[in-house]
Image (tube, rainbow, N blue to C red):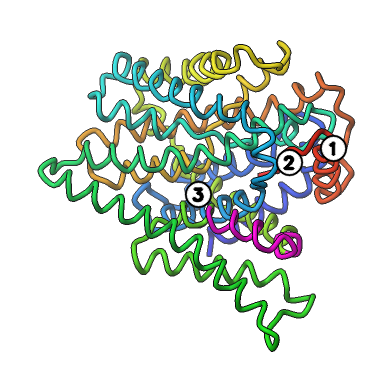
Amino acid sequence: MVLVAVFGAALLVAVLLSGLAARTVLSTSFLFLVGGALVSDGFLGLIHITPDSEIVAVTADLALFAVLFTDGMHVSFPKLRANWKNPARALGLGMPLAFVGMALVTHYLVGLDWTTSFLVGAVLAPTDPVFASAIVSRKEVPAKLRQLLNVESGINDGLALPVVLILIAAAGPSSGHAEASFGKIGLELGLGLAFGVLLPLLVNGLVRFRLLGAEPKLQPLLPLATGIILYALCHLTHANPYLAAFSAGAVIVAVSPEAKTAFEPLGEALAELAKFAALLVFGALLTPQLFGDLSFGGYVAVVLAIVLIRPASLLLSLVGTRFDRRERLVAAWFGPKGFASVVYGLLVLQAGIPQGEQAYTLIAVCIAFSIIAHSSTDVPIARLFHVDDLAGIPESQQRSSAEQADNNDNGTVARQR
């Protein structure tokens, strides 16, 4: 109950300061991260959470599922077909370069073996623009830039997941069962994709029966019910819930755009709550001991990950595109590590691999530094694009403005995570 009270207090403070956060370097994400750290054992000692606590795994799992479910609903296949080249460059070239670059600095600066080093690179490869909302949700920012950041972050979580699972199996304490582990991973991913596609199609078919259908005020609950069933089904069958969540969201918007429209306000609110809860719990893990366990080489690797590896990788992938210099630099800088990296890092810790604890410490510190660096710079950088002060405008209106701007710019993807 103490954790619930702390979350409620943090939520109240975040809402009351959200107007100020929209105008300054302060961010609501940062407030939850700091709030979790302050009430943990490392400071006030109000809550007692360790990385192997069940609340950590459950909160991170639910948050990532909710984020990917709503992310999937922002995927427009016609728009992607018309504007696929820049995100494809970021995903096909920039992401692998960042993955390999992080593995190299992890191996040589931190001293982890090659398999674990590549595992760290895979965990830190996904990005999350929730910590750059002043960029991705403002209509004044060029639509192609917002589309690049949104599509890249929406897809790279799913691309990194199979690599993370395979490398965990390869680095595991029992290498003799590696082939069986790879087969199990393939089955889990296949089941997740199948459930994510088939369940929304089944629900959509039921809605079309003459005697069935939801009244207007209950229509937002239809995708919610689909998501709840999908989450439970995946955990009961050991199917991968994250691939299922993203594919289900994409299928829902493809077969029933009206369901996406009805669910969007509720879905965005639930995803925000889940993300805030995950940030609070993750913040509680950021104790002084955790930061003290990371070596000097580890801190150098963290700094390089944020200021060199991601920026250089994306800049190389954008060579020859029509982005101007300012747009390229902004896209290169905003590669924050988010909820996917938190969940994948916990998977690494809980897998029992020989160097799992060292890898998790590096991952956790990198995520914390990334959240601080990127969530505190999005507003100042947004002003380079002459962003108007939207602090007093409801979030739904901000999102509508951004989506309208996208429609006017040859159909792009607008999404606030």
- The amino acid pointed to by label 1 is Ala
Q: Is residue 240 left or right of residue 5?
A: left
- The amino acid pointed to by label 3 is Val
3D distance between C-alphas at marks 2 and 1: 9 Å
The region drawn magenta spans: 247-262
Name the residue tied to disc 1. Answer: 405
Name the residue tied to disc 2. Answer: 414
Q: Looking at this view, is 84 or 25 the one in front?
A: 84
Q: Give the mark nearest the N terminus, 2 or 1.
A: 1
Q: Secondary structure at mark 2?
A: loop
Q: Work out whether 132 lies above or below 246.
A: above
Tag 3–tag 2 contact (CB < 8 Å): no
Residue 385, label in figure: none
Q: How many marks?
A: 3
Q: Give the mark nearest the N terminus, 3 or 2.
A: 3
- The amino acid pointed to by label 2 is Ala
Q: Which picture quadrant has residue 371? A: top right
Q: Position of residue 234 (x, y in %)?
A: 41, 64
Name the residue tied to disc 3. Answer: 281
